[in-house]
């Protein structure tokens, strides 16, 4: 059976180490700030607070919560990588925008009604 020809790899110009390091830190910083602000005061944080208060074992609760948050972040990264490989950025932006629009309308409808 003949083998399927492989798609040629696109060669990218190498990024100088200083620029790559700067870009990586910018991504880390943006990710940290976005996730940190999104998580402040959400139900996960409140739940963690309650479990720590009830159990009197804050470091064990911290360990469990940290593992859970890292695991969910890993799932998000894996899903994001798959989406980026299979769909165009324009489609992903459109779908993300539509999902936020639907969520906003739903929350507004709930608040008014």
Image (cartoon, rainbow, N blue to C red):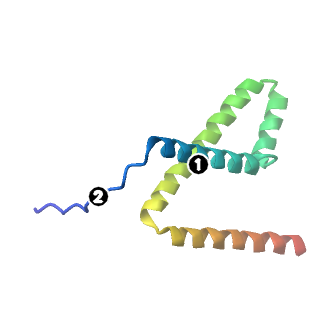
Q: Residue at x 49, y 50 (%)?
A: 78
Q: Decide: few, some or many residues near mark 1? Use Cα within 10 Å; few <14, some 14-19, many ≥20.
A: few
Q: Nearer the viewer, residue 44 or 7?
A: 7
The part of the image, by quadrant, that contains residue 6 is bottom left
Q: Residue at x 76, y 70 (%)?
A: 104
Image quadrant where one finds the N terminus: bottom left
Which residue is situated farthest in the right direction here? 112
Q: Nearer the viewer, residue 38 or 55?
A: 38
Along the horizontal axis of the image, is 24 left or right of 15? right
Query: Circle 2 — which element?
Result: loop
Labels 2 and 1: the sequence-earlier one = 2
Q: Residue at x 79, y 34 (%)?
A: 51
Along the horizontal axis of the image, is 25 left or right of 5? right
- As measured in the structure, the alpha-carbon distance from the residue carrying label 2 to the one carrying label 1 is 25 Å
Q: Decide: few, some or many residues near mark 2? Use Cα within 10 Å; few <14, some 14-19, many ≥20.
A: few
Residue 90 location (% of width, % of height):
53, 72
Residue position for label 1:
27
In the image, residue 23 above or below residue 5:
above
Residue 96 location (% of width, % of height):
62, 67
Residue 20 location (% of width, % of height):
49, 45
Residue position for label 2:
9
In the image, residue 53 above or below residue 72:
above
The part of the image, by quadrant, that contains residue 4 is bottom left
Contact, CB < 8 Å: mark 2 with mark 1? no
Image quadrant where one finds the C terminus: bottom right
Q: Nearer the viewer, residue 84 or 61?
A: 84
Tag on residue 63? Answer: none
Along the horizontal axis of the image, is 2 left or right of 25? left
Residue 21 location (% of width, % of height):
52, 41
Which residue is situated farthest in the left direction here? 1
């Amino acid at each position: 059976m003949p083998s399927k020809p492989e798609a040629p790899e696109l060669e990218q110009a190498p990024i100088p180490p200083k620029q790559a390091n700067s870009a990586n830190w910018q991504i880390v910083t943006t990710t940290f700030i976005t996730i940190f602000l999104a998580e402040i005061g959400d139900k996960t944080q409140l739940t963690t607070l309650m479990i720590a208060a009830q159990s009197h074992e804050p470091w064990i609760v911290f360990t469990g919560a940290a593992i859970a948050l890292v695991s969910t972040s890993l799932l998000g990264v894996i899903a994001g990588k798959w989406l980026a490989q299979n769909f165009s950025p324009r489609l992903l932006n459109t779908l993300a925008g539509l999902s936020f629009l639907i969520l906003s309308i739903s929350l507004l409808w709930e608040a008014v009604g």
